Amino acid sequence: MSTPNVLDDLEWRGLIAHSTDRDALRDALGGGSVRFYVGFDPTAPSLHMGNLVQLVTARRLQDAGHTPYILVGGATGMIGDPRDSGERTLNTAETVAEWTEKVRRQVSGFVSFEGDNAATLVNNHDWTAGLSVIDFLRDIGKHFPVNRMLARDTVRRRLESGISYTEFSYVLLQSMDFLHLFREHGVTLQHGGSDQWGNITGGAELVRRVTGEQAHAFATPLITKADGTKYGKTEGGALWLDAEMMSPYAFYQFWLNVEDVKVGELLRIFSTRPHEEIEDLEKQTAEKPFLRAGQRALADEITTLVHGARETEAIRAASAALFGGGELVDLDGATLGAALREAGSVEVAGEIPTVVDLLVLTGLAQSKGEARRTIGEGGAYLNNARVTDPELTPSHDDLVAGGWLVLRRGKKRFAGVAVSGG
RNA sequence: GGCAGGUUGCCCGAGCGGCCAAUGGGAGCGGACUGUAAAUCCGUCGGCUUUGCCUUCGAAGGUUCGAAUCCUUCACCUGCCA
């Protein structure tokens, strides 16, 4: 191994779950700048952690000199890829268009659009929307043996519960993307999540069948929790990158709370630190887990990547204030106020509502019933003191740091109430 | 097109005329123990103006004092036959 090959780095990071001919891929990546693509379907208004894996991987390839084509699935998003959980509900064209735009803006932040190997954004709607059914069936469909399509894992699992022709056909659209990008832009490599492996190889094979030339592909592993279940299932669902859908504070907290046994794996996947530093953090986590050095590094780095350094710094300060273990009254108003604004806060003017109402108002509880239950379970706190009376109404004497009430549910979830007037 | 089976709370799944807001498991939430970790144990888990009321068991009607449970129609899913 004379010159470092980016594939070795990706392998070290555990990012290669599947790949086409590994040696051919290594040769390609060891040569000149490879044009590669990765696609994101607008199935939600925001990307999530799974997509982030692909984005940082694309960036690694770009930093190694290769040229990214970032595809947003304006067309494939209209169809929906088959998943095990069952048939999707089709989104309207307006919704898909709106999400396409949001996703397009979001992906733009993760790759560079400058230099010799500047990234290019493409939308498969551009070459798919105008295609006639006749052309599609003749030029694309002809290359897909149905018996092979039926053998694909996701399809096979769906045969019992049912799958529409629409979703069954998804692989043709995505494969067509690879062929299109191969022909029009010289793209010879596609990567994606391992759940996309069937679609990815479909594209590589279509390129080979139609042009007789070799296309490369690899898939990253699915990230799971220590117990093997899917990750990113926090309150409200996935781990979103959009600050509107998941506050940067909550995002940071997620990474800070990663299980010890997963820290190393996640650092390898997401961190841009040198290998030695990551190995050192892994060692620290193994030897002194209570220091949570790995978690802190992970949370800092990923939050900075997604939400910026300034925001991350504010969150760190907020976390230190709220979790520092000191007395709230010892904190100065500016510090506590800033911390609570990061954690989530609401404003109340005049009369102060009951604790139950405040729990709902701040979003710490979904309903009054849940708020009462939480109090009954001993999980509600006002200014770090357990609340036992569901009828309790805080008074102005309870205000700390110049007008704040600090509400907490459980050990980790804080919210502030800024009281004015009265 | 015919026949059979199915559609229950976030998910999986019991219930098959009153004792059903509906057994059980998982997820979630809270407590204890910790390190804002894991594991474990305990509790909780539709809503509300909370000793009661309201809305839920694919949809709409109907039978009944009373329906998730019976009948009719519709929608969707699965299997077998055409």
Image (cartoon, coloured by chain):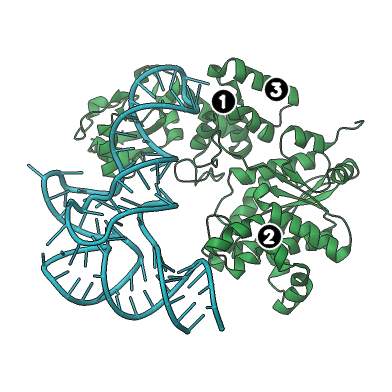
Place residue A392 in its image quadrant: top left
Q: Which residue is mark 3?
A: A279
Q: Which residue is mark 1?
A: A260
Q: Chain of mark 2?
A: A
Same chain assignment for discs 3 and 2: yes
Quick one: SS at disc 2? helix
Q: Amino acid at mark 3?
A: Glu
Which residue appears at 61% of the width and 24% of the height? A294
Q: Which chain is green?
A: A
How far apart marks 1 and 3 lie (CA) works out to 14 Å
Disc 3 crowd, CA 10 A, few/some/many (<14, 14-19, 20+): some
**In this rendering, would A117 be left or right of A327?**
right
Place residue A323 in its image quadrant: top left
Q: Which chain is cyan?
A: B
Q: Name the residue nearer the viewer: A90 or B11.
A: B11
Q: Name the residue nearer the viewer: B19 or B30.
A: B19
Name above or below for residue B40 compared with residue A37: above
Which residue appears at 53% of the width and 59% of the height? A86
Q: Nearer the viewer, mark 2 or mark 1?
A: 2
Which residue appears at 82% of the width and 55% of the height? A187
Place residue A376 in its image quadrant: top left
